[in-house]
Image: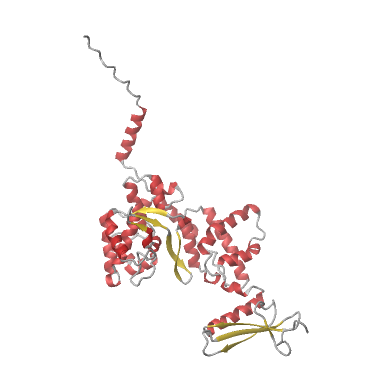
Amino acid sequence: MAGQPADHPGGSVTSTAQHPPLGVSIRSDVEIREGRPKPYRARVRWTDPSTGDQRSKSKSTVTPEEAQTWIDDMVRAASGGINPAAATQHLVDYGTEVMPLAIRGLERKTLDPYLAGWRLRIVPSLGHIPVRMITNGVVDRAVYSWIEDECSRSTIKNTLAMLVRVLEQAVRDGLVDRNVGQVKGWQRAYQQAEDELDDPRSLALPDWETLITLADALVARSHGQFTGWGHVVLFAGCTAARIGEVSGVRAGDIDRRTWTWTVRRQTTPGPGGLIDKGTKGKRARKVPIIEEVRPMVTERLDSATGPDTRLFTGPRGGRISTAVLRDATHWDEVVTGLGYEHLRRHDLRHTGLTWMADAGVKVHVLRKIAGHGSLSTTQRYLHPDQRSIDEAGDALSAHLRPPRAPATPRLHAV
């Protein structure tokens, strides 16, 4: 018959573009082919319900576990009618594929904020993660980042509702066993964050000497007394940067001519470990590097092998994060011993912004350094003392006082 594959009589038709249709019975096996980079060949067979042809599909893998996982995905696809590729899809791709199902039944006034939550928060925070690797902890961290970005309570509620709808479809498709988007307790975390942001100054260290004492104590408690941890703490405190942003700084980001740092990226948890991505808000910003830390920065720049060299790494050259810093330095024990038991790594940022505000940095400049989206967030760091209040009153009085008429020169009689 014209167009019939040569191996059709008495055999099976191997298809590389077709997946098993819904409801068919799957037969499988794993063949070992020695000497190949991927020696395990997993294969599934089924009978085409419309033609009666014997069909098959195969994939080569490095380990027998990978082979069995692929077979299980194919069997699950045949029983559930989903694309087997969805098993390894990232959330952004899977969500795009199932979006018509996820948003069914929504009214227009609800649909718009839900889709905005998907586009503006879920995709940037979680879109790069495979659906099967999204856990309660991953969602918790995403929610907290939205809280730190000053999203309103209703915005977070709508965003989570959209995430729940997409992950509910993943449950129906058999990709995951439960919907991890249904998080609890985020309202309590939201209220706690609001309380802290109302007075971020209360979270700051009092002075430079205290910051040095903290850095030295953390180094002393670290394995091998790694001085890099102290440098990270000093740099974060003086630049009002997040620990992830300190981890992301490269040699080329530092301008020694003007002693400024262009903040372009941050290190965050991702699938398989720590990854680099853009800063919060996706905007680069410039931060001054003060004289007190320039010798340390100079030493690190001089030892850099190129502009892409990381300025701050762990003792083995790896990326650092707030959790890595905490564990490597016994942070909780150290800060408790110094009398700052509530101090967190993020409070180094509060410390830097508080010091800059007290130094008289203008609020619009401070906002740019901090990278705040809202001016009201920056204004929380301002704490006018009595002298500045008196000076403001004197300035207003001087402004309102009527100008004096110029003195008329007296003419002396000749």
Nearer to me, 306 or 322:
306
Name the residue at 32% across, 68% down. 330
Q: Is residue 379 above or below residue 243?
A: above
Name the residue at 54% across, 57% down. 120
Horizontal side, residue 295 vs residue 314: left or right: left
Percent from the top left, x then y, of residue 346?
38, 59
Q: Which quadrant of the structure image shows residue 233? A: bottom left
The single residue placed furthest to the top in the displayed view is 414
Q: Is residue 273 above or below residue 238?
A: below
Percent from the top left, x then y, of residue 197?
41, 52
Horizontal side, residue 91 vs residue 296: left or right: right
Horizontal side, residue 183 vs residue 414: left or right: right
Percent from the top left, x then y, of residue 320?
38, 67
Count the marks.
Answer: 0
Q: Is residue 51 visible?
A: yes
Q: Is residue 178 above or below residue 146?
A: below
Q: Which quadrant of the structure image shows residue 298? A: bottom left
Percent from the top left, x then y, of residue 324?
37, 68
